[in-house]
Amino acid sequence: MFFFLKGRTATSAALHCLGIESTAHTFGVGIVSDDGRILSDVRDVHVSAPGTGIHPREAAEHHSEVAARVLSEALKKAGIPAAKLSGIAVALGPGLGPCLRVGATVARALSAYYRIPLIGVNHAIGHIEIGTLTTGAKDPLVVLVSGGHTAIAAFSGGRWRIFGETEDITIGNLYDMFAREINLPSPAGPEIERLAAKTSDFLPLPYVVKGNDVSYSGLLTASLSKLRSGAKLEDVCYSMQEVSCSMLAEAVERSLAYTAKKELLLTGGVAANKILQQKLEEVAKLHDAKFYVVGSPYTGDNGPQIAWTGMLALRAGLRTGISEARVRPKWRLEDVDIPWRDGSA
Amino acid sequence: MVQPKLIYKGAEAEIYLESWHSQLVIRKSRVVKPYRIVELDEGIRRSRTAHEATMMQEVRKLGVPVPAIQHIDPESWTLIMEYIQGPTLKEELYVLPANKKRSRCSDLGEILGQMHEGGIVHGDMTISNVLSEDGRLFMIDFGLGDFSKETEDKGVDLLLLNRAIKSTHYAFHAPLFKAFLKGYSKAVGKKRCDETITKMREIERRGRYFERG
């Protein structure tokens, strides 16, 4: 690879892949080069009204409105004309159907018009790949936390294998559904973290770990009922954050002991939570593993995560026919074959 | 006199092999978790230690092989129990011939079924929590176990076990889980076995991508 690049002038001959992200509230477009440089990252986030969750149709309408502008800004910032791209990658799932269809439509049109190969990408794999790209982690146990995922995975035998996950709602859902009740806009993680930092008065709340799995629905109900029975909002935020992050830390520790991996990578939107970062860093230390957190601009959904995964797939010879590029709202990350990684048992 | 020797550092506890009243025993100590605040950590460790001992005695009464508990000290979060050498079923499945792999999984199905019929769920049902000594399977690690006749809780045991086999022995996953279910069905009957499998699938779907954020 290195020698291959060396003989060329970097700008004229390098490969460039564009990636489109539209799985939930973010419409994002990014462009990356094959040496892993992120040349542009433009996003427009649909903000739902306080006290309501993300509405799939409203978010999709937002995406349709901003798509053309986000796309042209991303091309302009990268300084790459669309016709010179080597691949168009798009997140086909998992995510909200109406939102996914906006990204897929734009991608199919671009690919057909410019005759550039199309690559359908799994959004969760995108979170993992941008995590390894920005941290240099080689063979980590991955903790993927967001509105759509709470999963613990490790790579072996050509696929990411799930070692633990939530058995009901995700950690992102827990925070967002709690926030909805108290009229905060979602994603609400940062606001809950800010309120929690004001206190250290701990209220007992249900701590539910099942093997390497967690279950957050009881914690949500109990947190809301504490609030209704007059507990201070800060104390409830603090206690809910402590319990939810500790539960996940324990599930991660169990998975780390089970897999004996020597690297731990935290990625996805909730990876921005400092308390969760601290707890997982402690877990890594206990098992002599190196701890990594995805580069800070790339915790939330973004175009580069799709572009980079598309680039890896493109180099591995993968293509998606335009007629096969249908959205897959429930696409599981463990069902994706990954030919570009060395399998390790 | 044997010096205490750390033989396994698990997620929850440190496992020492040591001599105790001139016997070779296992000492399981639940250690402080620096990632949990003290208010949370102490309660969890104390209750799981006492609880694990209770569950092991009860499981034993059902005729399911478990190491015998010799001593409980909830104040130092420690259990002393009979030493079963192992290997774990997870390790053994790597080296056994295919027919033996299947028969071990079927045996495991039978003893887990026996537990479920007796109203006890394991709560952390993986193939590293099963020791195999001369072909006889011992269940260990009952810290997350519980008294329950709920299909939901039994479904979680099946789900965790299915995933444990799938994630580490993926090449043999289908025949091994099928063999497990054969043994399980033998112990609980076909009807209950089918109900629990249905519940397992339902739980698995629940945690996947959530349609409303």
Image (tube, rainbow, N blue to C red):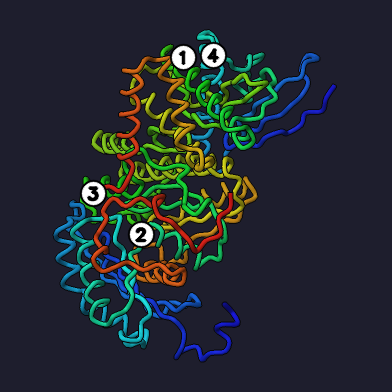
Q: Secondary structure at mark 1?
A: helix
Name the amino acid, label 3: Glu
Q: Any mark on residue B74, and which? A: none
Q: Position of A273 compared to A102: left or right? A: right
Q: Secondary structure at mark 4?
A: loop
Q: Nearer the viewer, mark 3 or mark 2?
A: 2
**Residue extending furthest toward the right:** B1
For the residues labelled 4 and 2, the Cα–Cα distance comes to 44 Å
The residue located at (34%, 24%) in the rendering is B196
For the residues labelled 4 and 3, the Cα–Cα distance comes to 42 Å
Q: Quadrant of the N terminus of chain A?
A: bottom right
In the picture of the structure, the residue carrying the numbered disc 4 is B64
Mark earlier in primary sequence (4, 3)? 4
Q: Residues within 10 Å of mark 2 (few under 14, many from 20)?
A: many
In the picture of the structure, the residue carrying the numbered disc 1 is B114
Q: Nearer the viewer, mark 3 or mark 1?
A: 1
Q: Secondary structure at mark 2?
A: strand
Q: Secondary structure at mark 3?
A: loop
The residue located at (35%, 63%) in the rendering is A121
Chain containing mark 1: B
Q: Position of residue A92 (x, y in %)?
A: 29, 61
| Figure quadrant of residue B32 | top right
Name the amino acid, label 2: Asn
Q: Position of B169 compared to A81: left or right? A: right
When the figure is inspected, residue B155 is found, relative to residue B11, above or below; the finding is above
Q: Are marks 2 and 1 in contact (CB under 8 Å)?
A: no
Q: Are marks 3 and 1 in contact (CB under 8 Å)?
A: no
In the picture of the structure, the residue carrying the numbered disc 3 is B211
In the picture of the structure, the residue carrying the numbered disc 2 is A122
For the residues labelled 2 and 1, the Cα–Cα distance comes to 41 Å
The residue located at (30%, 70%) in the rendering is A20
Is residue A229 among the parts visible in the rendering? yes
